[in-house]
Image (spheres, helix red, strand yellow):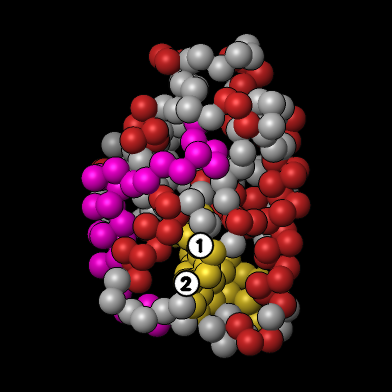
């Protein structure tokens, strides 16, 4: 089994610095372009199946990557993004910060994610890890998937939660940084063992990478 995990392309809320969570925001024009360039880079991969978050930005990204390939697409709510509850749609960067909690507390989302407290109705990182682990355990244990190549389209935080199952450093939830738009991680699963063989690959020009979260600069100029 080979699993290709992709974070969705860019959205208007990414650009504007608003918390998206489970709010259904589609790709913007640049997000569509990034997905198209990623599709070109992945055009030779023989996908047998696609599993996507039901949110349109993830599904759009998956459909663009798959192109004309006749691949079944399954939606699974367990790989939706973390819910920020009633904070969704609120500016969360220093220049537009409007979250009703001190910015130092909000920054724990990036610096101490397991201590992060979301808005009312939102999820903790531990809750996200629980539902995504259920997804991971089910997919990797299915005998019918043993010889399949599967595209999994999800979101930045949800992607890290899924791969938390195999990352060596369990303390570093973000694996160094928030994955950029259309970043791809590849996992091989064989005889019950999972191995990360592709780590946050991008298929477009690295100079176009935008770190919308200002957590850690992924590419130096």
Q: Which mark is residue 73?
A: 2
**Whether residue 64 is situated above or below residue 92 in the rendered picture:** below
x, y percentage for residue 90?
49, 23
For the point 74% across and 44% down, the residue is: 127
x, y percentage for residue 108?
65, 26
**Whether residue 39 is situated above or below residue 206 in the rendered picture:** below
- Does residue 125 appear in the picture of this structure? yes
Query: On the rendered image, what quadrant is the N terminus found in?
Result: bottom right
x, y percentage for residue 131?
72, 54
Q: Which mark is residue 43?
A: none
**Which class describes the residues within 10 Å of circle 1: few (<14), some (14-19), or many (20+)?**
many
x, y percentage for residue 221?
29, 37
Residue at the disc numbered 1: 52
Q: Are marks 2 and 1 in contact (CB under 8 Å)?
A: yes
Q: Secondary structure at mark 1?
A: strand
For the point 36% across and 81% down, the residue is: 70
For the point 43% across and 59% down, the residue is: 59
Which residues are drawn in magenta? 19-46
Number of labels in the image equals 2
Residue 4 placement, left or right of 101: left
Mark sitting earlier along the chain (2/1): 1
43 part of magenta stretch? yes
């Amino acid at each position: 089994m080979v699993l290709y995990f992709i974070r969705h392309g860019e959205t208007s809320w990414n650009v504007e610095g608003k918390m998206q969570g489970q709010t259904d925001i589609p790709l913007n024009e640049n997000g569509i372009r990034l997905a198209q360039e990623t599709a070109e880079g992945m055009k030779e991969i023989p996908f047998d199946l696609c599993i996507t978050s039901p949110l349109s930005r993830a599904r759009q990204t998956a459909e663009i990557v798959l192109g004309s390939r006749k691949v079944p697409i399954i939606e699974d709510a367990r790989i939706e993004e973390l819910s920020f509850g009633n904070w969704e749609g609120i500016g969360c960067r220093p220049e537009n910060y409007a979250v009703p909690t001190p910015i130092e507390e909000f920054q724990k989302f990036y610096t101490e994610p397991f201590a992060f407290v979301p808005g009312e109705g939102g999820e903790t990182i531990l809750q996200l890890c629980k539902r995504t682990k259920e997804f991971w355990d089910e997919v990797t244990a299915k005998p019918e998937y043993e010889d399949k190549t599967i595209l999994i389209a999800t979101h930045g935080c949800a992607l890290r939660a899924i791969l938390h199952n195999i990352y060596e450093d369990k303390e570093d939830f973000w694996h160094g940084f928030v994955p950029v738009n259309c970043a791809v991680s590849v996992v091989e699963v064989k005889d019950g063992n999972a191995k990360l063989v592709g780590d946050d690959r991008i298929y477009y020009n690295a100079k176009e990478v935008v770190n919308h979260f200002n957590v850690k600069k992924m590419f130096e100029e």
